[in-house]
Amino acid sequence: MRYEGKIYRPPGEWRSFLLQATVGCTHNKCTFCGMYKDKHFHVRPMKDILEDIEMAKEYYNGEVDKVFICDGDAIVMRQSQLLEILDALYKTFPRLRQVTVYAGPKSTKTKSLEQLQELRQAGLTRAYLGVETGWDELLTKVNKGATSKDILEAGLLLRDAGIDLWVMVILGLAGPGEPSRKHIEETIKLINEMKPNHFSALTLIPEPSTSLYQDVKKGTFKLLNAKESLIETRMLVEGLTVSPLHFTSNHASNYLPLNGTLPDEREKFLKMLDDSLRGEGYIRSEYSRGL
Ligand code: SF4
């Protein structure tokens, strides 16, 4: 398999075959994201993608059961190309049971519900949607290139198509104080309406290549401390009413790793958070946090 530039994948895809179908992200302008700053978005030639599938067949001896199609926004590819890739993957790997993809909100909305259903039937099982926040003012500020309405519509389309929907939000994206509260309140409203299957809260750690990092350096943006971040997590655990919801905040960036199902584990999570907030529970040290 051949890869162009650094490859990113969701944490849960650590044992998937990573098939690079696109390079970079169609948007690539979010102030907090440095993942694809060195890449210009393009779709790889189909010939190369199909050759990589053949290479993976040799490399893994045909024993692939999960595939993540990268880079940033592969859902944007033409319908015929995605169908051809899915067909080749399932024909090549008899044990394949899951094919997943990152899905940008605007790119998802270039597809109709019928097209997304067609992709689901062809074996696209899960999409990861970067929500970041449900607060429009903040979405504009971080240059997400999509409104909360766009994000909600994209999430509902994916969910209605039967695609397993995994959303990600970013703790600390608004900074501390009143903006922090507003960020989480609006995010809770959006997620409760979207009703995804899985929810991940990551904690903002700006990469040096981002403009948000420069704001932190200049002192015009303040990162949350551990306590403020745990308070945001607590608000989410308390406010999310989707049932059942696979809730995670166990990314390396998070101060307190949580992974379980709401509402069943709500009380347990709240107790863990309250213990940590009182200084009687676990809090990951700054030293061991990372991206
Ligand atoms: S956060 Fe997502 S949409 Fe924004 S630049 Fe990064 S990959 Fe692209």
Image (cartoon, rainbow, N blue to C red):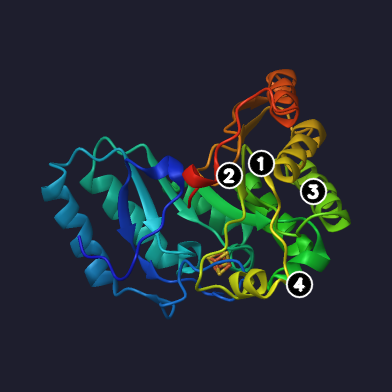
Residue on which disc 1 sits: 196
Q: Nearer the viewer, residue 280 or 137?
A: 280
Q: Which numbered disc, 3 or 2, marks the residue closer to the eye? A: 3
Q: Between marks 4 and 2, how big is the CA–CA gap?
A: 22 Å
Disc 3 versus disc 1: nearer the observer? 3
Q: Position of residue 195 (x, y in %)?
A: 72, 40
Quadrant for ligand 1 reads bottom right
Relative to 125, does residue 56 appear above or below in the rendering?
below
* Residue that label 4 marks: 140
Instruction: Please give left or right for residue 118 compared with residue 196 in the image.
Output: left
Whichever of callouts 1 and 2 sits on the residue coming sooner in the sequence is: 2
Q: Mark 3 highlights which residue? A: 184
Which comes before the other along the chain, label 4 or label 3?
Answer: 4
The residue to which callout 2 is attached is: 166
* First of labels 4, 2 by sequence position: 4
**Secondary structure beneath disc 3?**
helix
Tags 1 and 2 touching, CB below 8 Å: yes
Tell me the CA gap for discs 3 and 1: 17 Å
- For mark 2, give the secondary structure: strand
Disc 4 Cβ-to-ligand 1 distance below 8 Å: no
